[in-house]
Amino acid sequence: MRKKFPDAAAVKGLRVHVNPASIDHRRILWDKFLQGWPESHARHPGRLRCLLKRGVPAEKRKDVWKALLACDQIRTTSSFSYQECVRAVRLQLVELNISEYSLSIHNNELWDANEESEQLDGEKHKPTNMRCLVALKTLRQIIVDVDRTFPTHRKFMGNSTAAKEGRASLFRLLSVYSVYNSEVGYCQGMSYIAGMLLMEMKSEEESFWSMVALFEKPKYLSGYFDATLQRIQSHAAIFDKLLQQRYPRLAKHFISLDVDPLMFVTPWFMCLFTSMPCWETVLAIWDLLLLDGISTIFRVALSILHLDQARCLGTSEMGQILPKLLHPSPELLECETFMPVVWKISVEKWEIESLHAVVTEEKEQPGSKRSRRSLERTENRIVKKFKNANENSSSLLQRMRNIFNPLGQRILQDASNVTSWTGQQEPSSSVNHVRYQTYRGRWAQGPGSARVIRNPSTRNVPIRHSPRVTIVTQAVQPKAKRMEKISVSQKNTNPGKRGRVQHVKVPSPTRPKRSGHSPREMKVVTRSARAQHSFKTFHTPTPLRKSQVKGHCIVSPDSSSPEELQLLKEAVVKDLSDM
Amino acid sequence: MTSGPYNYSYIFKYIIIGDMGVGKSCLLHQFTEKKFMADCPHTIGVEFGTRIIEVSGQKIKLQIWDTAGQERFRAVTRSYYRGAAGALMVYDITRRSTYNHLSSWLTDARNLTNPNTVIFLIGNKSDLEAQRDVTYEEAKQFAEENGLLFLEASAKTGEHVEEAFLDTARKIYQNILDGSLDLNAAETGVQHKPSAPDSNQANLEPGGGKDSCSC
């Protein structure tokens, strides 16, 4: 295969340090590659990656991005005409008596004229004499933000003709997009991406179609800017999970300081890192992003934390961590040192999908890990408060109450949850509401729909050997149906094999408790998303695996065939769509 | 930013809310850096700033959350209201729409914070007198009707910016002194930090204790 491609040897040697003289050579390689697009990519998918790793020459970037985004394809298949829409928007501006070249938030024409009507009917009101192509509210928001997008970049800054044109085209781009997708309209964060595309794609119309590709394709940012901002929130939760797996110490440190990843990843993800101080790095990130899609944002975010880990761990206050995360230092993001880290860190698509399933599932379940995590934050606050109360010389009893009351309530609540999940109660038992059996071996066979629950009361039972596995064999009420579906598919693939039941290693009750918090004892492992994730993680040779083996003992040694993995994956996807 | 013993005795959490482009980030920047940021990019999600001030001889660290103004970001920014001791609600005196939306911001602030949260209304851009669209009197009346503190300020000139942040802190401190704000209650947005040398170490304990978590 390689022999057919004349520059294969050169491409193969990409990992070698590139000297400046080879820049021309790189250009030639890119030229050849782009000429044969998309066949060249289909035939040698790895080659593009190699070329990208080496860097995209500035003058080729436009073509590379266009090819990767396939925006020409969208443009030719769409019935929407950019130019026509621009003309229509202009007409609307004329009727409003404003010009795209003199947009100002102090231009009261736009605000005054329609203030009353807006108050009456909100956005739906459309004055009869006016063509309300772009909703007035959206128009105002765009005008407010156009002046504040890349305010220090010469393309958009100051009163020069070029800057005025730059702001006008940014305005046109955003307002036309709000017409193209009126459901999304305009959302803050879009303007940075639009500005970036204008800088790199040069042509306004091409920027528009690239923007459409970025905002509409599921591979990239579709759903990122919709009215509920649901996707960014779920991505922040997924990132939180990734962080717990890859950098558990850091994740714990964040919890102890009350730092939620949503705080700092929102600007990173929603502006696609355009707020980062090193432009070369931003461009390299975008190159990779357009190639690999959304997983890149997780890789980049993990890389930033990877490089900033020591500093973060050395701080003892949220006020010291957050500003540096919101605005990382240029030294940290130096392209030469930063990008190799990004290339090294991998986040697979399936990982994101399965973590998404986990996040969605935990959101639905009370007593889930997510709520445990938020409970940890509360506990942390309470402990802090306790220390404060200490200084305030309140009574010992009061202090004890402060600590134990919320936890005690929580335990009771969780206990009742467990009871309700298991469907029926044991009438005779006052301590153990859940029927359980303890198995001595490491592997246990059980019915397909078994649900493993680490019972809080297990530690009251005299157990002589460890590790223990506690398995509750009752059907689970709320999601039993879904669980069964998955287990059936597993059964079919691998009827005779063991390991279909999830196993949880329970530390011996005689050992000192590791977490120190009673609610943490309520470990619920389901057969669905979370278990599936652990299973897949174990069977995939990624860096995740090591930490997973350490952290979880949810493994199944026998069923590792690719077909089964595929089936599992489908099951998870189905699982997701069922929700 | 010393990591040793605390050089302040309280932490107050503030949140700045208001419509897009009213100057929330500029107010924060003016307060923390004492400079006007002319080329201020718009905020995505939240920004964060701190400054140590002195009220009645007590050093207080203000932890200020500056939120994105666009309506759809409320889904993300709502979580920051929780446990705020002070809320600065900002409108732009040159744009009436930003004033008209105050009631919805106030509803959010009242619903999502605790009853003791001090809400301060700021009419920003007071330097742009020629373009004024909202009179001082009507805003004052709105503030009085809703029991808010009120000032017109300018992030550009710095006029009344300090006062707005400091008055809020004074009011919170007063609430602590007269007992209407109970430091032991949850989510007050106030943390008392004793300045004992080992308190910093003690603060790390809860995190350290959880080190062996198996999740």
Image (spheres, rainbow, N blue to C red):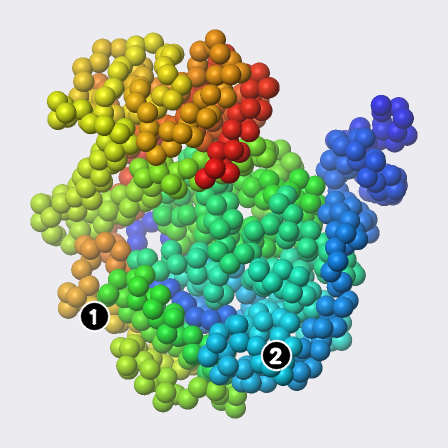
Give the residue at x 50% y 70%.
B20
Q: Which residue is drawn at 48% across and 29% down?
A: A533
From where the camera sits, is residue A540 visible?
Answer: no
How far across and down, in percent of the image, does residue B182 sit?
Answer: 18, 60
Disc 1 element:
helix
x and y percentages locating residue A404 in the rendered image: 17, 41
Asked whether, in this view, residue A354 is left or right of residue B199, the answer is right
Residue B79 in percent (x, y) is at 38, 55
**Mark pair 1, 2: CA separation:** 42 Å
Q: In this view, does B94 lie above or below A209?
A: below
User: Can residue B209 be seen here?
Assistant: yes
In the displayed structure, would residue A102 be above or below residue A531?
below
Question: In what element is the residue under mark 2?
Answer: loop
**Which residue is the site of mark 1?**
B174
As rendered, which of A128 and A284 lies closer to the eye? A128
Name the residue beneath numbered marker 2: A104
Q: What chain is tagged by disc 1? A: B
Q: In the shown orientation, is residue A27 left or right of residue B165?
A: right
- When asked about the image quadrant of residue A136, the answer is bottom right
